[in-house]
Amino acid sequence: MKKPTRNSLSKSYKNLSRANRSKQILNLFLRYIIILLLGAGNLFIFYKTLTPITVYTLKIILNIFTQTTLTENLLILSTIKIQLIPACIAGSAYYLLLILNLSTANIKLNKRIKILILTFITLFILNILRILLLITINSTIFFQPIHELFWYAISTIFVIATWIFTVKHYKIKQIPVYDDIKFLYKLIKKK
């Protein structure tokens, strides 16, 4: 068997480096294509998936306290009717979490999936709690200001807090989008 020379080892490292760069480029390309595809059609996939899950979860919870009937996206309680419109479902908040997840470089696939599941479940629970709170104050003078507060500020805080919690929990060091741009810049600069 022929012993590898210093020159042949150097070439194999360069090839490995090229293969690694190609893999990183493909990974980056696929992540951003997925972001674009899932965002297409006015977030259709998010609303098609999350609307029934949210509506049926609320119906189950509300049935514990009062007789609740469901007609499409309309929950009918004994004294009030609640129509869950797309804004109630918060599809854009889930999409933002997906963007943060997929635009963060150097996360292994199984870890990325775990992070996505954790962030989606956390946001789902927070959203259900938000809707339940709004239902309880529906007939009061506080409903409109609290509803608007949730609409304009707290929903954003939910997304940011969920992402920050996830970053700390999974010890993510990369910065979404920035590290991808930095990688591409270094790639261009080397040529």
Image (cartoon, rainbow, N blue to C red):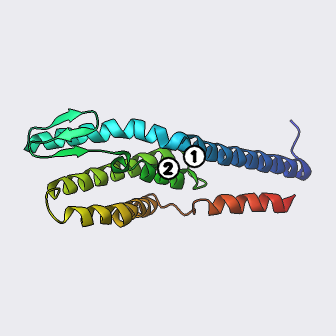
Residue located at (13% from left, 42% from top): 77
Image coords of residue 42 (percent x, y): 51, 43
Which amino acid type is marked by label 1?
Ile
Relative to 134, does residue 63 appear above or below in the rendering?
A: above
Residue 151 placement (x, y as % from top left) = 35, 60
Spot occupied by residue 168 in the image (x, y as percentages of width and height) = 43, 63
Is residue 8 left or right of 147 when viewed as pictured?
right
Task: Give the CA separation, mark 1 to mark 2.
Answer: 7 Å
Q: What is the x, y in percent for residue 7? A: 91, 51
Q: Which residue is mark 1?
A: 35
Image quarter (top left, top right, bottom left or bottom right) of the C terminus:
bottom right
Q: Amino acid at mark 2?
A: Leu
**Disc 1 or 2, which lies upstream in sequence?**
1
The image quadrant that residue 153 belongs to is bottom left
Few, some or many residues within 10 Å of mark 1 (<14, 14–19, 20+): some
Q: Quadrant of residue 64?
A: top left
Which residue is disc 2 drawn over? 98
On-image quarter of the N terminus: top right
**Residue at 37% over, 45% down:** 86
Whether pointer 1 and pointer 2 mark residues with C-beta atoms closer than 8 Å, the reply is: yes
Which residue lies at the image location 47% right of the left edge and 53% below the top edge? 97
